[in-house]
């Protein structure tokens, strides 16, 4: 005997007809899935985009910077940066430039700008070797930095950070301004900006290392002497391993070396933190959406008991009734997933545009998310479909 | 189909609801309906008229006895086969119409064709729906929704839906119960026409006027056929 069957097209037509009858309810029901999928797509997209930015910035600067401090306070050991530290560091493979710097800390150290200020100004005084300027790669606003000749000769020249120049009232070098440090005159030869590798230089007066040692001696224990090393891309980790032995072969452990973090680890860590937090949030939203669909579909089944009875009287099997309910529920989930994915993409693109980032989204995410909506709708429709299939037509038709 | 084969043949049919409480809704009913017969089933409320209609319409399964529909023993058929038979060979007309409110008249008729085992193209189904609506005098209102139709018009659309698949048996449950006398008369006239065109018709009613139009009246009391003639 031939069995009842409904064509796929008729089934879809019936589902669409059922959904458009109550557009308001359909939209509100799908809203839960829209929020869930939208949050999911936004979170994963933004996490991927943000980690991409972290990687991009990291690759430019941090991956080529190694810092070695003059001691490990946690071990109670201090080992000053040796006088020939720059040459030792530059001897390592992969090192492009290296230089040392520290803060000259002398009680009562006074700085005076000339001629516009006559009052002492409190600024840090830093001893910066000529090689350090090459490693720091500052943007020279005016003038120049000093070279190794000035360093070796102990010349009384100074380079000002841009903020320090403002504090000292020096706006131009055309007048060949001078400053006095402890009544010792120094000629300002340059003003620098954008010293990303050592931003404290911006607020300091920098003088050659040789000059500082000649006047104030070796760095004090609290001087935070640092060897700044600029490396070739990809060489930083290797340089960080070798640097303690080059600078202090007799006690390499006394130097505190700061290698660049592994960019993949950093990116994964940031993305992982974001993903874990917000994906949980998105899953909660999806669960709420699924419960919403299940609840609304169940209510619809109860409201349509009479219609279900009629369909059974017209030849529908319990299985066909259940299938129709499931397809309606899956369609709701799919619609929610489609709109939610669109919303998520818009959010990611908008945030990326505002923050001047490059939006990064996996095709798997954008094309797969609507499928997740369909899956959620299908699962949410299981129980209402079961209830619909169990409706007895003779009882339903009495309503 | 062999015209000698009765459309309906019930032998010792019973239906007992397991409960609790256990209710014997029908017991030991014998009934034979010839092709093209017009039968009215009468009886007071709770007598078992609707139970008999549900069994005849394959909506309920008897707990005892044998039921042959057009020669096919449907008592023991699986539900899927009963559903297919129900869709193809039985037409229902209900007191409360059971039209889908958000569909037009023609769309309501098309719903009757959705589950047929034999598939027909949509254009042919629409053509068939137009033909049946014309037959019941509703061709001009084919795009009207139920809310735009009078009670009599709704019942005519419901009759058209029942006739869509050219059933062997037309079951009418209180077809004029929700209609005024004018519309009731029109609907009864339409049922007469359908019968005269060769359709086997069973009308469940407690209205003597409606029952009087049938060729044969069957009285049911307390689940048993008490009078048949």
Image: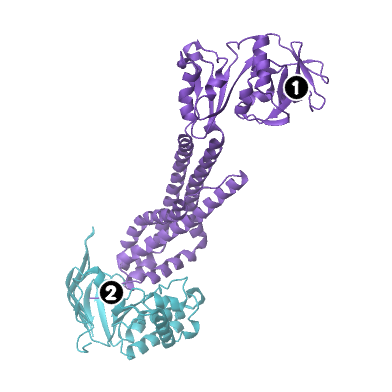
Quadrant of the rendered image containing residue A113? top right
Which residue does the numbered mark 1 point to in the structure image? A188
Quadrant of the rendered image containing residue B47: bottom left
Give the labeled residue for mark 2.
B84
Badge 1 crowding class, 10 Å Cα cut-off, few under 14, some 14 to 19, many 20 or more, is: many
| Residue located at (64% from left, 12% from top) | A213
Relative to A210, residue A62 above or below? below
Question: Is label 1 on the same chain as label 2?
Answer: no
Real-space Cα separation, disc 1 to disc 2, in angstroms: 100 Å
Nearest the viewer among A363 and A208 is A208
**In which quarter of the view is residue A164 placed?**
top right
Could you tell me which quadrant the N terminus of chain A lies in?
A: bottom left
Q: Which mark is residue A173?
A: none
Instruction: State how many labels appear.
Output: 2
Q: Which chain is cyan?
A: B
Label 1: state its secondary structure: strand
């Amino acid at each position: 005997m031939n069995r009842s069957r409904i064509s796929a097209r008729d089934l879809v037509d019936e589902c669409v007809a059922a959904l458009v009858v109550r557009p308001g309810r359909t939209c509100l029901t799908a809203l839960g899935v829209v929020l869930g999928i939208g949050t999911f797509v936004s979170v994963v997209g933004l996490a991927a985009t943000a980690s991409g930015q972290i990687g991009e910035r990291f690759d430019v600067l941090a991956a080529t910077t190694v810092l070695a401090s003059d001691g490990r306070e946690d071990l109670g050991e201090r080992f000053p940066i040796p006088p020939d530290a720059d040459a030792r560091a530059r001897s390592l493979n992969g090192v492009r430039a290296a230089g040392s710097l520290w803060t000259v800390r002398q009680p009562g150290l006074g700085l005076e700008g000339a001629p516009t200020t006559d009052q002492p100004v409190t600024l840090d005084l830093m001893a910066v070797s000529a090689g350090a300027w090459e490693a720091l790669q500052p943007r020279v606003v005016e003038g120049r930095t000093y070279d190794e000749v000035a360093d070796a000769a102990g010349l009384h020249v100074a380079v000002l950070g841009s903020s320090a120049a403002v504090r000292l009232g020096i706006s131009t070098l055309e007048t060949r301004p001078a400053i006095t440090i402890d009544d010792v005159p120094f000629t300002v030869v340059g003003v620098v900006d954008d010293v990303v590798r050592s931003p404290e230089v911006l607020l300091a007066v920098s003088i050659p290392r040789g000059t500082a040692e000649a006047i104030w001696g070796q760095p004090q224990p609290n001087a935070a002497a640092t060897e700044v090393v600029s490396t070739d891309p990809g060489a930083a980790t290797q340089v960080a391993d070798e640097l303690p032995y080059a600078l202090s072969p007799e006690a390499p452990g006394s130097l505190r070396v700061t290698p660049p973090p592994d960019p993949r680890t950093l990116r994964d860590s940031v993305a992982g933190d974001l993903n874990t937090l917000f994906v949980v949030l998105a899953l909660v939203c999806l669960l709420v959406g699924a419960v919403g669909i299940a609840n609304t579909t169940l209510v619809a089944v109860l409201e349509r008991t009479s219609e279900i009875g009629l369909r059974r009287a017209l030849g529908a099997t319990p299985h066909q009734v259940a299938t129709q309910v499931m397809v309606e529920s899956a369609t709701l989930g799919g619609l929610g997933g489609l709109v939610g994915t669109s919303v998520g993409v818009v959010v990611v693109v908008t945030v990326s545009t505002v923050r001047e980032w490059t939006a990064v989204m996996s095709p798997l995410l954008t094309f797969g998310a609507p499928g997740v909506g369909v899956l959620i709708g299908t699962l949410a429709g299981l129980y209402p479909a079961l209830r619909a299939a169990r409706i007895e037509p003779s009882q339903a038709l009495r309503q | 189909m062999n015209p000698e084969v009765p459309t309906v043949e019930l032998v010792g049919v019973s239906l007992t609801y397991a409960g609790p409480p256990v209710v014997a809704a029908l017991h030991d009913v014998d009934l034979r309906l010839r092709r093209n017969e017009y039968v009215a089933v009468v009886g007071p409320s709770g007598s078992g008229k609707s139970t008999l209609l549900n069994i005849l319409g394959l909506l309920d399964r008897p707990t005892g006895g044998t039921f042959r529909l057009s020669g096919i023993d449907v008592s023991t058929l699986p539900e899927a086969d009963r559903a297919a038979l129900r869709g193809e060979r039985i037409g229902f007309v209900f007191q409360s119409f059971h039209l889908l409110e958000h569909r037009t008249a023609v769309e309501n008729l098309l719903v009757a064709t959705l589950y047929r085992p034999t598939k027909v193209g949509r254009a042919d189904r629409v053509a068939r729906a137009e033909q049946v609506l014309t037959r019941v005098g509703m061709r001009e209102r084919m795009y009207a929704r139920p809310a735009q139709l009078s009670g009599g018009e709704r019942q005519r659309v419901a009759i058209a839906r029942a006739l869509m698949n050219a059933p062997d048996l037309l079951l009418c449950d209180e077809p004029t119960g929700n209609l005024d006398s004018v519309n009731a008369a029109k609907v009864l006239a339409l049922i007469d026409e359908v019968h005269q065109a060769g359709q086997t018709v069973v009308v469940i009613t407690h209205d003597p006027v409606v029952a009087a139009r049938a060729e044969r009246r069957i009285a049911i009391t307390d689940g048993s056929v008490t009078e048949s003639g």
